[in-house]
Image (tube, rainbow, N blue to C red):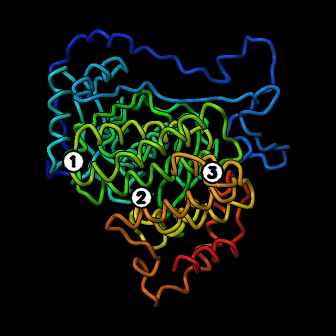
Amino acid sequence: MKDAITTLSCKEKPGAKPLAGSQTTLTSAEDLQHSPPVETRSPYEPLCDQSSAVTHRKPSNRAGLVDITKFAIPEIIFGRGSLNHAGQCALRLGAKKVFLVSDAGIEEAGWLQRLMDILEKEGIEWVYYPGVTSNPRDFQVEQGAEFYLKNGADVIIAIGGGSSMDTAKGIAIIASNGGKIRDYEGANRVQRPLPPMMLITTTAGSGSDISQFCIITDMKRGVKMSIITRTLVPNISIVDPLILRTKSESLIIQSAIDALAHAIEAYMSRIASPFTEMHSLKAIDLILANLQRAVATRSLDSLEQLSIASVSASMAFSNAGLGAEHALAHSLGGHFDMRHGVVHPILLTSVMRFNMGISVQRMAEIGRVILKGQRGSDQETALAGIEKLDEFFASFDVALRLSQLIPESERHHLEPICKMAVLDACNLTNPRPATWEEFLQICEEVW
C-alpha cells in the first residue's frame, strides 16, 4: 500500500444481480427533448449567463405556480453495512478495472483495504491512486487523470471525505475532457460525459458524494476553484454510518457544521425551491438535535442521524447553490490552506446577520427550527435563532475567531482574499451577492 500506484489483477467474475429496488433514472433536460417544448433553466445557468433575467424564487407558500426547476441526485445506498454492496454496485456500472482514490487516513483506518477486499471478492481488478491531500491541488488531479488513462481504468471509486471525492471528480473531468482543471472553473463548463463514478463518504458533512460541486485548489493563484456541473453528480453514493465510528471528535464536528452551513445557505439561496427547502430545514433540525450527543457518546444512532442530515443538506445545496459564507470560506481556505470545516463556526452567523436585511422572513423560518418555535416578531425570532447558533458553536472545542487561525502578521492578506471571494460562484446565489468591502467587514467583525 506504500507504492504510489498499486495494481491487483483478479479473476473476472460474471456480473452480480442488481440490488433490489436500486435502479434509478435521473431525468435531465436531454430526457425531455421529445416532450412538448417548455422553457427550463438549470439551477446554475444564472451563474453562466448573467445577462439573462434571473428572478429570485418567491417563498414556496406563495399563490400561483412554482417555477420550473430541476432536482438532480445520484442513486443513494444508505445504511449500516452498505459498504458491503460496493462490489455489486461497481459491476452494475460496468467495472472491470476500477480506479480507486483515497488518502492515508482512510488507509490507516482499514477502510480502503476493506473496499479492496470487497472488489476482489467480485473479481474486479483495481488501480489505486493515493495522491490526495486536504484541499486537493490542481496538479494532483491532473497527475491522477494521467494515471487513470495510462492504466486503462473504467469506473472511478473514491472512499474518503470531501478531499478524496473532489479529487476523484477532478480526475474524471480531465480524463474525459482533457486540458487543465482550471479550464472548468465556474458553472457548466464540462462538455463531455464523465467516466462512471461511485463515491463512498467517510464523513457526515462534505456532500461531495451527492452534489454537482467539485472544489480544487489552484496553486498558482492560491484559491479554491468551484466547479459546478450536473455531470459531477456521481452515479452511485454509498453512505455507511458505521464508518463514522472511526472518526476523530474534531472531524465529526467540522463535518457536521459544514453540513449545517450547506443547509442554511441553500435555504437562503436565490434559487432555492420547495424540493431543496424541505431538505434544508430537516438537516438543520437533525444536526442541532444530534451533534452534541454524537461527540459525547459516539452513539451510532446519533451518528446515523448526522449521516441522514448530511445527505439532506447535500441534496439541498447541490440543487440550490450556496452563499457568501462558502465563497469567503473557499478564499480563506485556498490562501491559508486551512481545513474547510474550521471556518464555519467563525463565519456562518456573521453572514446570516448580513443576509438578515434581504429576507427577514426566511431567516425567521430558520430561527423557528433552531428555537423550536416563534420568539416575538420575525425579526426577533431570526436574531434569537442566530444567537442560539452562536451558543451551539461555543459548546464545542472549536475556533470562534479568525485570529485563532490566522496570525496577526498575515492579516493584511484579508483584502485580496475578499476581492477573490467576490468572484466565487457561491456568492452569486447568496440572497444578495456581497462586495469585497462587505466581505472584509465580515472578516473584521469575526477577527
Q: Nearer the viewer, mark 2 or mark 3?
A: 3
Vertical relation: 435 (above or below) 308: below
Residue occupying image coordinates x 34% and y 28%: 78
Q: Residues within 10 Å of mark 3 (few under 14, many from 20)?
A: many
Q: What residue did someone put label 2 on?
A: 139
Q: Residue at x 65, y 29 (%)?
A: 70
Disc on res. 347: none
x and y percentages locating residue 172 in the rendered image: 44, 39
Instruction: Specify whether 200 is left or right of 9.
Output: right
Provide the residue designation for mark 3.
186
Side (left or right) of 190 relative to 403: right
Percent across and percent down for residue 145 are: 40, 45
Count of numbered marks: 3
Q: Earlier in the sequence, mark 1 or mark 2?
A: 2
Q: Crowdedness of circle 2 by 10 Å Cα count: few (<14), some, many (20+)?
A: some
Question: Which residue is disc 1 drawn over?
Answer: 298
Between 221 and 343, which is closer to the camera in this rendering?
343
